[in-house]
Amino acid sequence: MSDNHHEEAHTGPIKNPKQLLVAVLFSFVIPIFAIIGLVLYVTSADKPAAGAVNPEKAIAERIQKVGMVEIRDANRPLRAGEEVYKGQCAACHATGAAGAPKFADAGAWTARIATGFETLVQSALKGKGAMAPQGGGDFNDTEIARAVAYMANAAGAKFAEPAAPAAAGAAPAAAEAAPAAAAPVAAAAAAGAGEALYKQACQVCHAAGVAGAPKFGDKAAWSARLPAGIDALYNSVAKGKGAMPPRGGAAQASDADLRAAVEFMAAAAK
C-alpha cells in the first residue's frame, strides 16, 4: 500500500496521450492564435480611414461633375462634305465596316439614294443600325448633311451640298435697305429654294422618271398634270401619291420650299 501511494505521488497530471494533446493545445496552439489576433487588431487600428491620406483628392473625387460643357465657336466656317467624311464617316464607310454602305459603292447606295436626301440625313443624325447618332458630335447638322451628300454623290447621286443657314436678321435688314426690290428678291429666293430642294430630294426620281415619276422637263409627261394647277400638284406632293412618299421624302422641308420645288418642276415642263 505504501509503495503504490508513493508512485502515485510522483506521477504527473498527464496520464494518457489524450491528456497530452489537450495540454499541448492549451499551452502552444491557443496562445499562438491569441497573439495573431492581437497583432491583427493592433495593425488594423493603425490604418487610416478612406480619404485621410489625401483628403484633397478624396473631396475632388466626391464632387466631380457628372457631365461636361464644351463651348464651340458658332461662327466658325462650316466644313465641306469631304472634310467631314474623312474626319468622322470614313472609319466605317471607307471599308464597309458593321454593314455601312462602302464609299463609292453604287450597288450598296442605290436603294438608299432612292429614299431621298432628307431621309439619308435623318438616318445619319438619329443613328441607324450599328451607326450611332451623329447629331451633336464634332460636326453640326449642316456639316453632317454635307457629308451625306458627298458620300451619296460619290455613288451616283446628284445632291447639292447644303448651304450654311442664313444669319438671323439678314432678311429684315435687306428689306429695309431696298423695299422696292423686295418682291423680285423674294421671287428669286423662292425659285432658288425650289431648285435646291429639287436637286436635294426630287431629282432622285424625277430626273430619270423612276417609278412612274414624270421626268423633269418632259412636257408630254407633265401635260396631263399641269392643268390641275399648282395647288393640286402641291397637295399631291404633300400627301404622297403612288410610289412617291409624303412630301416627296423631304420631311424637313418647309411648305414654302416644297411649293417652290413644285413650281420649279412645273415651269420646266411648260
Image: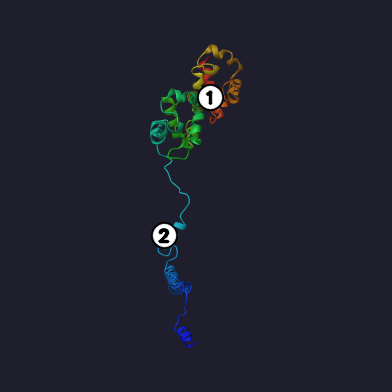
At 44% from the left and 57% from the top, the residue drawn is: 61
Q: Which residue is mark 1?
A: 260
Q: Around disc 2, counting alpha carbons within 10 Å, would you say few (fewer than 14), some (14 to 19), or many (20 or more)?
A: few
At which x and y percent is residue 137?
45, 40
At which x and y percent is residue 129?
50, 34
Label 2 close to label 1 by CB (< 8 Å): no
Q: Secondary structure at mark 2?
A: helix
Q: Secondary structure at mark 1?
A: helix
Q: Is residue 184 visible?
A: no
Front one among 28 and 97: 28
User: What amino acid does circle 2 point to?
Assistant: Lys
Give the numbered dot on residue 57: 2
User: What amino acid does circle 1 point to?
Assistant: Ala
Query: Total number of numbered labels?
Result: 2
Looking at the image, residue 55 lies above or below residue 225 = below
User: What colouring style does the render use?
Assistant: rainbow
Displayed quadrant of residue 36: bottom left
Q: Earlier in the sequence, mark 2 or mark 1?
A: 2
At which x and y percent is residue 79?
40, 34
Q: Nearer the viewer, mark 2 or mark 1?
A: 2
Front one among 146 and 4: 4
| Residue at far bottom of view | 2
At 52% from the left and 23% from the top, the residue drawn is: 261
At which x and y percent is residue 122?
51, 33
Front one among 31 and 58: 31
Please indicate whether residue 238 sits to the left or right of residue 12 in the image: right
Give the numbered dot on residue 137: none
Q: CA distance from mark 2 to mark 1?
A: 62 Å
Looking at the image, residue 243 lies above or below residue 166 = above
Q: Is residue 117 visible?
A: yes
Q: Around disc 1, counting alpha carbons within 10 Å, would you say few (fewer than 14), some (14 to 19), or many (20 or more)?
A: many
